[in-house]
Image (cartoon, rainbow, N blue to C red):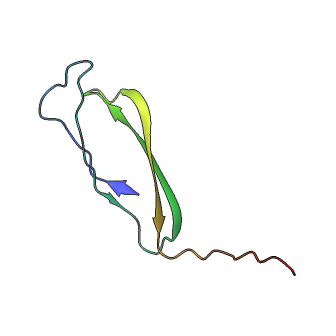
Amino acid sequence: MRGKPLEFTEPIPVGAKREISIELVVPSGINGLIQSSWRMTDENGNFFGDTLSSILLVGTVSTSTVTKAP
């Protein structure tokens, strides 16, 4: 998946919480479960914090049906 980088306009104090929203784009022709993982970086590109993940179900996924024999 792709998404645009998000830059905060002001520093966030240690321990503070912020809600963010990021639009993700799935490449065309892709169906099934797609996982995206990312991390925050500071102004120098150093990673910090937990890895964030999302799992999306894209398109139609067929499932099999189990039946019991009599």
Which quadrant of the structure image shows residue 53? top left
Closer-to-camera residue (66/2): 66
In the picture provided, is 15 more to the left or to the right than 11?
right
In the picture provided, is 39 more to the left or to the right than 15?
right
Q: How many marks?
A: 0
Q: Position of residue 55 (x, y in %)?
A: 47, 54
Up-down relation of residue 29 to residue 10 (above or below): below
Q: Position of residue 5 (x, y in %)?
A: 26, 46
Up-down relation of residue 21 to residue 14 (above or below): below
Closer-to-camera residue (10/59): 59
Up-down relation of residue 20 to residue 28 (above or below): above
Residue drawn 81% across and 76% down?
68
Q: Position of residue 20 (x, y in %)?
A: 24, 42
Where the N terminus falls, by quadrant? bottom left
Q: Position of residue 29 (x, y in %)?
A: 47, 75
Outermost residue, top side: 14
Up-down relation of residue 20 to residue 36 (above or below): above
Residue drawn 34% across and 34% down?
40
Closer-to-camera residue (16/65): 65
Outermost residue, bottom side: 70
In the picture provided, is 29 more to the left or to the right than 42?
right
Outermost residue, front side: 70
Residue drawn 24% across and 29% down?
17
Where the C terminus falls, by quadrant? bottom right
